[in-house]
Amino acid sequence: MSAWDDMTGQAGAVDVLRSAASASSSSMTHAWLITGPPGSGRSNIAYAFAAALLSGDPDGDQQTIGQVESRTHPDLSILRTENVSYKIEEVRAFATTSYYSPSVGRYRVMVIEDADRMTERTSNVLLKALEEPPERTVWVLCAPSDADMLPTIRSRVRTLRLSLPTVDDVAALLQVQLGVDAVTAERAARLAQSHIGMAKRLATDADALSRRERTLRTALAMRTVTDAVMAAAGMLEIAGDDAKAFTAERDEAERESVLRSLGVEPGKTVPPALRSQLKALEDDQKRRATRSLRDGIDRILVDLLSLYRDITMVQLGRDAAIINREFTDDLRRAAESADPARTLHTMDAIQLARRRIAGNVAPALALEAALVTAIR
């Protein structure tokens, strides 16, 4: 068993990191930035690299791999967030642990997932730690692009860019890891556009697949401005349902766990002295729900981009390149109602909506403005 077994479509990156993890390597550096589009496996390859570094074996030994996968290795520190952004206090506390000496391995490995979710002020806290690194500490940051990081941070890390795996690679991974049939695996990988995490969800969650289909059918049915406004509201509702499905069960389990730890029986009133601790949990859950909703809205916009990309492909006579093959007849009818320039204009409007929502514009307004351009 190797730490790199599931690194689908990233042979070049694996070679670089295996070489760096070698005990005699001269290419090792104290800080790495792993970038790549969503679903390319940034965090997976970061943890595989951590296993190789901690074990002293470029392929990792089985015990270390197991400890890294369970996130229990004593020399592995992890910072991740389910909120919209990192809090400066948690980054400061995390940076402090980078000065601890490794206890059992060659290095102390510091992994930060979604490092792009740091504000400039928070990034400056990280910068200080990168400027004066301990000799045996290795930082591994993950972000969609190096442009998402401050130039001062980019200048202190070695960047490794991942590519998006092919549909066939992701489908093969789904068959091996999830045991799904070849047809289900191919459809999930294709509709997810090779996003590994989303492909796994579409392959195993019929409700997620149904919500995606509802989104595309709603977009294809628009004929008037009123339709576009109603479609935006419906898509936001779909995103909300998706976010609730993703967080509700976990939120309740966390609440029950906290109440048990506080000695409060289920259904009983929480004593006033303990309510602040429960309020802190609820605040964290609200922030996580906000991020889940934003991620859900962005996923809907990505799905819409795939729809109008397909319409453009049909208009240009490239039917073989269609992603949403299940909608082929609808795509052809939509392609006849406009020219490629107008369809590309809609795609630009959807990309603009993604940027606006990321910049805290009201999602309903951004989505309505994009969908109005898609009226046929």
Image: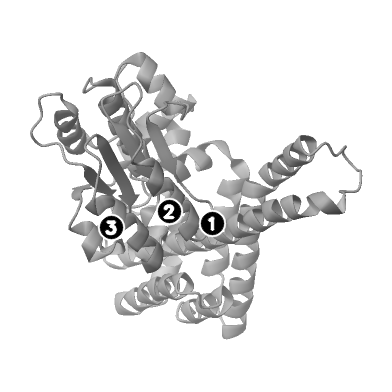
Q: Nearer the viewer, mark 1 or mark 3?
A: 1
In the foreground, 205 or 364: 364
Residue at 31% x, 47% y is 141
Badge 2: residue crowd in 10 Å (few <14, some 14–19, many ≥20): some
Which residue bears the numbered disc 1? 83
- Asked which secondary structure carries label 1, the reply is loop
- In space, the residues marked 1 and 3 are separated at their CA atoms by 19 Å
- Marks 1 and 3: CB-CB under 8 Å? no
Whole-number angstrom distance, CA of label 2 to CA of label 3: 23 Å
Neighbor class of circle 1 (other Cα within 10 Å; few <14, some 14-19, many 20+) is: some
Residue 278 is left or right of residue 213, and the answer is right
Q: Are marks 2 and 3 in contact (CB under 8 Å)?
A: no
Task: From the image, tell me which residue sits under label 2.
Answer: 92
> Residue 116: x and y, percent?
37, 58
Work out whether 46 lies above or below 131. Answer: above
Label located before the other in sequence (2 or 1): 1
The residue drawn where x is 45% and y is 67% is 333
Would you call the spot at circle 3 few (<14 residues within 10 Å), some (14-19), or many (20 or more)?
some
Percent x, y for residue 153?
Answer: 25, 58
Secondary structure category for the residue under label 3: loop
Numbered disc in front, either 2 or 1: 2
Quadrant housing residue 204: top right
Q: Nearer the viewer, residue 375 or 92?
A: 92
Which quadrant: the N terminus?
Answer: top left
Relative vertical location of residue 349 with respect to residue 133 in this rendering, above or below: below
**Amino acid type assigned to the residue bearing label 1 in the image:** Asn
